[in-house]
Image: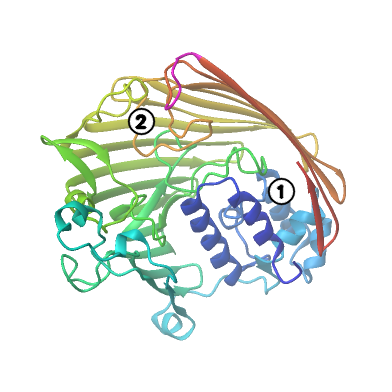
Amino acid sequence: MCAQSAWMEWEEQIGEEADLSSWEEQYENLSELAEHPFNINTVTKEELEQLPFLSDKMVENILYYVYKYGPLVSLNELWGVEGMDKQTQMFLKDFIYVGNSVEKQAFSWKNLWKYNKQEVWMRTDIPLNEKAGYADIPLGEEEKFASKRYYGDPYYLNLRYKFQFQQKVYVSLVVEKDAGEPFFNLYNRKGFDFYNASVQLNDFGKLHTLVLGNYKASFGYGLVMNMGFSMGKYTSFSTLNRAGKGLSKYTSMNEANYLQGAGASWKWKNRWLLTGFVSFRNQDATVDNECITTLKTDGYHRLKKDMEKKNTVFNILVGSNLTYDGKYFEGGFTAVYNVFNKVLNPAERLYNRYYPRGRYFYNVGVNYKWYRGKFVFSGETAVDKQGKVATLNQLTYSPVVNTSLIVINRYYDKKYQSLYANGFGENSRIQNETGLFIGLETSLLSKMKLLCYGDFFYFPWYRYLVDKKKTIGMEGVFQVSYSPSNSLDMLIK
């Protein structure tokens, strides 16, 4: 336990309840930040906000402490930051260091080639048992078993290459072959089944971010566009009122949750940020009579039926965002237009009657965050092409830094449609849900933390595997954690 960083243990706790692919991506991002820590004496608000365990108030207090007392000479000085507790200090020390209080090294081609960091690594899985999909087909029964026989060998393989210069330049290439997929033969003569390349540039004058290749986009609180990681209700309230991070590179091996094209963000008068992005990509789907009945997202191309669904539809997405970052108010406006070359029309069941249907979709959303003393009011309201509404609003009260009382109200119309929405809620979709969440998080003592909440939700329409509409539910959690030393952490939940 001592050999593992504190934030890694925290991430493992999150991973027990989070979606695996998005959790792996979040873990990779934090690992990358730990490898390239921030200079505490020059760190910015935007950089600290990349650390999910820091609340908005804690970010503000860290920056204020450095501003008021000058450059730190030791990380032990963090104990002087108002509200700093032992757990936060343990997490933070892996992502910061004490350096000179000078401007960051300017970009140059000489520095780029001299001070970059490059990594190459490979993973392969070799099974020791034979699965049914690889077994020899009995003589005379080829027609019966052919549809269940994998095209490729049983070995899994992926390769990764990463190039990084400070926090300014990122280049990555990821290639993957799943077990059962052919490799340089049959229908896959190009080798690997999945290629993922991305380039990201940060902070070049007025150019805030530029992404090329595969990338992600997340804005507001996820009611229009969120391809990032959502930790949900079960860990900490520190990031529940933090908006999406905008454009970022895509380095995961998930073959569905990404955009492909280009995007850029421009700074305007320090407080404003204008973003535009476009995506053109083929997607796997089941197509029947020129209608898309299901979008295939697992990324497997091992069977004949998998190949029949590969790259069968084409999607174009265009979006923009305008964000204002003020001292007492933050806000943003997001618009996304999404069109397929075929009509999306899932086979109708009671539970999916109001799922997205049609050839084109668009969503518009406004997110907001207002600071008033010890109160923070934040949220987002969005509408789709039919005028259906989804809204999320939350009020946070923090009498002291390490205590938060939060109330969240959400209303997602049963007919609201957004293909890339992902936000706070009990449902996997931003649709068909109304709820009220009340929670408390506080440090009882310097080494003890309490987190408890109650969530009450209502679903006006049918849900998958539920045979009636107008159902209700509730969830309650009480959690106490105690860390008497750096090598011991106890939890009751």
Residue type beneath disc 1: Met
Residue for point 60% across, 58% down? 44
Q: In x, y percent, where is residue 338?
A: 25, 38
Quarter location, residue 348: top left
Q: In x, y percent, where is residue 25?
A: 49, 57
Query: For this rendering, which residue is in front, 360 or 296?
Result: 296
Residue for point 24% across, 48% down? 284
User: Along the horizontal axis of the image, is 430 left or right of 144?
Assistant: right
Q: Quadrant of the N terminus?
A: bottom right
Residue tagged by mark 2? Answer: 364
User: Along the horizontal axis of the image, is 246 left or right of 406?
Assistant: left
Magenta highlight on residue 146? no
Residue tagged by mark 1? Answer: 58
Q: In x, y percent, where is residue 374?
A: 73, 33
Identify the mark nearer the N-term, 1 or 2: 1
Q: Which residues are magenta?
A: 464-470
Q: What is the image's colouring?
A: rainbow
258 w.r.t. 361: above or below? below
